[in-house]
Amino acid sequence: QQPVQSPQAVILREGEDAVINCSSSKALYSVHWYRQKHGEAPVFLMILLKGGEQKGHEKISASFNEKKQQSSLYLTASQLSYSGTYFCGTDPPPNAGGTSYGKLTFGQGTILTVHP
Amino acid sequence: DGGITQSPKYLFRKEGQNVTLSCEQNLNHDAMYWYRQDPGQGLRLIYYSQIVNDFQKGDIAEGYSVSREKKESFPLTVTSAQKNPTAFYLCASSVADGGYGYTFGSGTRLTVV
């Protein structure tokens, strides 16, 4: 089942902050975050593994709460280049052999628009 | 530079015709994936392959077929059985367990006329 992202869209002025949430009804092994510019391929931002760790990428960071089956993406002091659609991709726990399939199920996306 | 190449970028097909979308990677990735993207629906998995000569159906495999005869290549055929094939198709690759994220191709926009 597809993870649910919120909000569906957000509009910011440069320098403002935003949070995008990703929630799953299933247990998770990892959560990926991607950004896609219009008409282009999604670009990998970061991966968060089971364990609640927080990762960072420039002024973009994320957290993963495996107990709540949720992840949040934090965009700080937004720049015009941050505009695009953000997707989370979720990966179920590994099989009994301990191998994750790496087969992601993506959320519906959050459209972020940053204005000057 | 390593990457993943999809061709063609735009494709027009008449109803009732099969069409094959190309996907080639030189990243030495074991796993490859095909996703379909429709407005407001995110990315939906069509097929994926973790190793040569093996592939698995994703969530929306009906009307599609794939092959994985070489590690570098994972072509997708959209058959006439696919009822609504007009969409943006994305190919991706990763290491076997996806642990370093996906690398996506630039996509093929298929339009049925």
Image: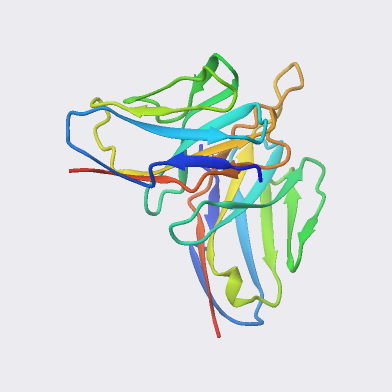
Whether residue A45 is visible, yes or no, is: yes
Image quarter for residue B54? top right
Q: Residue furthest front?
A: B1
Residue B93 % position (x, y) = 60, 35
Q: Residue furthest bottom?
A: A116
User: Up-down: is B32 above or below B1?
Assistant: above
Look at 28% across and 26% down and name the residue there. B79
In this view of the protein, which residue sits in the foreground, A46 or B65?
A: B65
Residue B46 % position (x, y) = 44, 31
In this view of the protein, which residue sits in the foreground, B73 or A112?
A: B73
The number of numbered badges drawn on the structure is: 0
In this view of the protein, which residue sits in the foreground, B3 or A23?
A: B3
Look at 55% across and 85% down and name the residue there. A116
Horizontally, is B5 left or right of A57 in the view? Answer: left
Residue A109 % position (x, y) = 50, 55
How are the colours assigned in the image? rainbow
Look at 58% across and 28% down and name the residue there. B72
Residue A27 % position (x, y) = 67, 35
Horizontally, is A103 left or right of A68 in the view? Answer: left
Whether residue A24 is visible, yes or no, is: no
Horizontally, is B106 left or right of A49 in the view? Answer: left
Horizontally, is B106 left or right of B39 in the view? Answer: right
Look at 66% across and 36% down and name the residue there. B27
